[in-house]
Image (cartoon, rainbow, N blue to C red):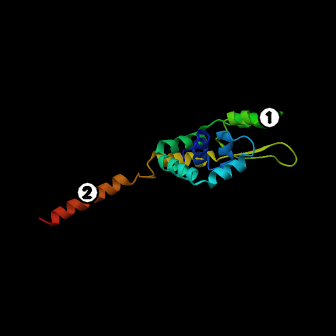
Amino acid sequence: MVLKEKEKMFCLYYSEMRNARAAAAKAGYGILTHRSALKLLAREDVRKEIERIDRTRLVSAEEVASGYRQLAFGSVADALRLIYAEESPDRFEMEGLELFNVSEIKRPKGGGIEIKFFDRMKALERLGEMCDGGKGDDSALPFYLALEKSASALRGCENE
């Protein structure tokens, strides 16, 4: 069975987000997105398309590094705009906000809004690990190379 364009979009968004309701909403399934999403995920052809997309979606080291850079250095301006907004933004305004650095948003019972951000220091540490190739501190490497060279020279002298 050939998937319709809207169904293909659902598969693509689901593969990206792993959130069926959000994928259905983003693909254009207006009312009762949760129900639409469950029906789509129950279909074999839809599941196979999601698997196909998953297989083709390879994340490069540069994409991962880009994500860590965004976490470490990204702006929090849209999150602050959300905190100080007098009215809650509608769905379209929310989709336009850059909230990549946000790990959690809550509305406490007493009112207001609580926003938690990802840890910038952890992102910087991971980015640092990626930049040095995961080698860590290799300042002792010249010493070990010199030891190895000396051992090889000694073995050469013993064989003569």
Residue at image mark 2: 149
**In this orientation, which residue lies closer to the viewer: 113 or 150?**
113
Report the amino acid beneath label 1: Tyr
Residues marked 2 and 1 touching at CB (< 8 Å): no
Query: Residue placed at 56% from the left, 42% from the top?
Result: 67
Looking at the image, the residue that sits furthest to the front is: 1
Q: Quadrant of residue 117?
A: top right
Question: Residue 12: image x %, image y %?
Answer: 57, 44
In the image, residue 14 sits, relative to residue 144, either above or below, namely above
Image quarter (top left, top right, bottom left or bottom right) of the C terminus? bottom left
**In this orientation, which residue lies closer to the viewer: 69 or 32?**
32
Question: Residue 139: image x %, image y %?
Answer: 41, 51
Residue at image mark 1: 84
Query: Does 160 sit left or right of 142 as displayed?
Result: left
Q: Quadrant of residue 5?
A: top right
**In this orientation, which residue lies closer to the viewer: 92 or 100?**
92
Q: Is mark 1 on a helix, strand or loop?
A: helix
